[in-house]
Image (tube, grey):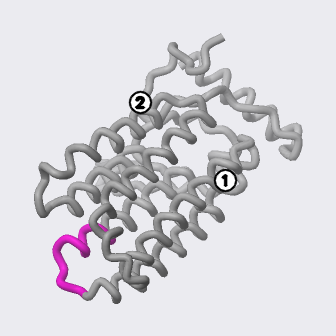
Amino acid sequence: MHFFNPAEPIFRSKQSELDYQDQVGLIKMQWRLGERTIFSRFYTRIDQIFVLWGVITGAIFGVAQFCPISWTIQAWLWSTLTGLGILGMVILAWFWASVERLRWVICTWAGLMTLGLVCTNLGILGGWWSILLYLCPLWLGLSALGYLLTAIGMHSRAFLVACGLHLFSIPLLPYTGRWQLLVTGLVMAGSLLFLSEVQWDMRPPVEFAELTPAQRQHNQHQHQLRQLA
């Protein structure tokens, strides 16, 4: 038996046959111009988390690269924003993670982001200035570890690819000169926003006792539809 499902594409267009846990909190967006649809997307709560962190990381590293704001002020601002991001992630993902029995993945990401925040603030607010020289490798490394553990938990090659991208970016940072913050932000935010727009591979759904019989039957039906597709 394969750990990863070789028959399933690593990335593909989003599937419309969603399990119950994916339909909870689903956001649908459609922009029309007369009779013509010019934009149509839907975002599960996991997609929403990717967008949330993509915006947060893009803002943090973009401002740090281009805006002459005091590092101390940035530390307080980004600590608040990261804390809200962690809280939002837990709230959005908890039901889905409970059904998929992946709460430990969410807790791991929360722990990694907290660790990164503590190290960053030690460098800025605690006077450990040497840490600031390694902020970009630090955050890329923590993200790579998070993606690796997510890949293991979900049996997903897509998150393994994300892990590899972040790890591969670390030795390239010295060649980017003074644009290290921008490059780090592009890698982190770009990966997150890309993942929010595609369907990634994952192990088959699991049975969860707290779902009602009708909800479990719905999931089984959706799984059969995906198999046919």
In the rendered structure, which amino acid carries the disc numbered 1?
A: Val
In the picture, the disc for residue 24 is 1
Q: Residue at x 34, y 89 (%)?
A: 73
Residue 196 shown left or right of residue 214 in the figure: left
Which residue was labeled with disc 2?
A: 11
In the picture, the disc for residue 212 is none
In the rendered structure, which amino acid carries the disc numbered 2?
A: Phe
Classified by dominant secondary structure, the portion drawn in magenta counts as helix
Q: Residue at x 45, y 69 (%)?
A: 119
- For marks 1 and 2, give the CA distance: 23 Å
What are the residue bounds of the magenta stretch? 60-69
Magenta span has 68? yes
Residue 182 shown left or right of residue 118 in the figure: left
Q: Residue at x 25, y 74 (%)?
A: 64
Find numbered disc 1 in the image and state the secondary structure of the residue it sits on. Answer: loop
Quadrant for the N terminus, please: top right
Q: Residue at x 41, y 50 (%)?
A: 141
Residue 174 shown left or right of residue 74 in the figure: left
Q: Quadrant of residue 68?
A: bottom left
